[in-house]
Image (spheres, helix red, strand yellow):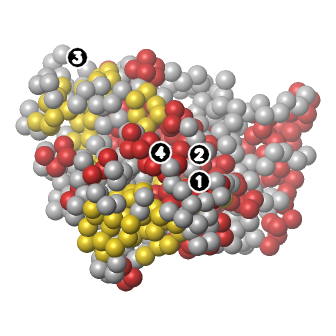
Amino acid sequence: MSTFTRRRFGLVAGATIAGLAAPAVLRAQGKPRVVVLGGGAGGGTAARQIAKDSAGAIDVTLIEQNARYTTCFFSNLYLGGYRDFESITHGYDKLASGYGIKVVNARAAAVDREARQVVMADGSKIPYDRLVLSPGIELIWDSVPGYSEAASETMPHAWKAGPQTQLLKAKLDAVENGQQIVMVAPPNPYRCPPGPYERASMMAHVLKAKGLTDAKIVILDPKPKFSKQGLFSEGWEKYYPGMVEWYGPDVHGGIKGVDPATGSVATDFDTFKGVLVNVIPAQRAGAIAGDAGLTDASGFCPIDPASMRSKADDAIFVIGDACIAGDMPKSAFSANSQAKVAAMIVRGDLTGSRTFPARYSNTCWSLIDTDDGVKVGAQYAATDAKIASTSSFVSSTGETPEIRHGNYQESVGWYESITADIFG
Amino acid sequence: MSGTPVYQDPAPPGRSTGPPRVDSPGGKTEEGLRLIDALQLIGNGHRRPGILLASTLLALLVAVPARASGPTVPTDGDPAYGEYLSAQCVTCHRAPATAHDGNIPPIVGLPSPAFVEALLAYRNGQRDNQVMRNVTSTLGDEEIAALAAYFASLSSD
């Protein structure tokens, strides 16, 4: 548990509210139950925040199929050799021991909205008064013709961190001088908008550090432009001249498909071959959200911008990459921010605790080369229509090395803080 | 007194060429800003000057309350509101603080006047960190007061 104490006010207030205020969900026996589904940046934060702030008044269960979680954020730094795999991998022990959260490391099969329970793969059921759904993304394999889950064993996506990330690194480390890497970038909307381009930077960094400057990285992009484009383009020119080539649709004319057997990507313009082909397909909300009828035609989940509550079900909150968050990008920072709003509203629902106007925030840092970090960020508020940006910034080209170094240092501090915020 | 740079703000000489100072409470001096840095560092154990020095610094701060808290920020912030708002802060400013979180300074247990002064300096454009400028651009005086009340209620040990 946290080591700081409250001097002026504290647990008494919480206990009074829980004891006196008539909770919206008054159960005949036991405490109100919150189930959080998905133990990533959104789910971990929500579970911890609800358990911490309700001080025992709410029974919190976190369902996550993996006992250890490797963060997608900073996985590019593992690829680039700046972090080891263990340093981006986290367990749930502290959430269980420090916050009284019941952690269930098993696979959930479905949400039974009628009965308000999560049905586990083994058939057991976990009932809830409020469900916080944070299932992340599902990859749409056939959005790239010829690609599949099986094909990802030879053409890794590495867009869900774990063994795929290690496979991508092993293949990157085997690249020789003069050889080519091909990346198929994803269409919008997708997890981590600057991620593919930071990844290309980290690949180039590894190759250059080994003197393999005749190796090349070709990015085939379905988008005409991308996040932090000016900053990445400047960095590639500066650090990796001739090593990174980006082709938008006006050049390649459309990505027709991949062939895992030959390691090739066909476009209208040409066929590109790589010793390493990294395919990042289109994405939608984690399958369990769609199966529960919480998604719309976009494949993601509409939510109320002021609360993160599902527009399809008042007892369910959808946070993180799976939701439609208006102007917010799909990032760990966004998911963490959304989780805090959802946690506040859930507590208000169940214990009558005070609620405040929703505020959201995001910052995304990207590393271009050693000590050269850039960032983009914004503040957000709820309007009737969406979560809308109220103020934003982005790094500039031509910044001093001191500023860029400071950005990188800041990102390292952020990683330590947000992972403590998520995993305890 | 030159503290370790907080958030890698550029050196003071450039400040006069920075953005115009709007809503600046009494036109803070470089000395005042460095005082805040020093207090932050003292409060967080990055350096351990004698008690005498700490007392002197605190006395200085107390002696100029109008400058320290600004004329518009109320001193009776709502700590419950502050607790909600603080959740955003701790995404980067780890709570409880650890020795080194990159160059992001700990803020738990910071005295209210120092906390308010620092946030106003970002909101006024006197400090340069883009993230903090952006964050404070959406914080009104009520929000800053609430945050200060909450963080001051926590001890850093």
Corner quadrant of residue A211? bottom right
Mark 4 touches mark 3? (CB < 8 Å): no
Residue B100 seen anywhere in this rendered image of the structure: yes
Q: Residue A226: image x %, image y %?
A: 44, 70
Mark 4 and mark 3 on one chain: yes
Q: Earlier in the sequence, mark 3 or mark 1?
A: 3
Corner quadrant of residue A56? top left
Regarding mark 4 in the picture, which secondary structure is present there? helix
Q: Measure the alpha-carbon separation of dots 4 and 3.
A: 51 Å
Which amino acid, mark 2?
Answer: Gly
Regarding mark 3 in the picture, which secondary structure is present there? loop
- How busy is the neighbourhood of tag 3: few (under 14 within 10 Å), some, or many (20 plus)? few
Identify the residue at horizontal 65%, vertical 31% (top origin): B98
In this view, the mark in front (3 or 2): 2
Q: Earlier in the sequence, mark 3 or mark 2?
A: 3
The residue wearing badge 1 is A206
Tag on residue A170?
A: 4
Identify the residue at horizontal 60%, vertical 49% (top origin): A411
The residue wearing badge 2 is A81
Mark 3 and mark 1 on one chain: yes
In this view, the mark in front (1 or 2): 1
Q: Name the chain under label 3.
A: A
Residue B74 seen anywhere in this rendered image of the structure: no
Which amino acid, mark 3?
Answer: Gly
The residue wearing badge 3 is A30
Q: Name the chain under label 2.
A: A
Tag on residue A185?
A: none
Residue A388, compared with residue B153, is above or below; it is: below
Which amino acid, mark 1?
Answer: Val
In this view, the mark in front (4 or 3): 4
Which amino acid, mark 4?
Answer: Ala
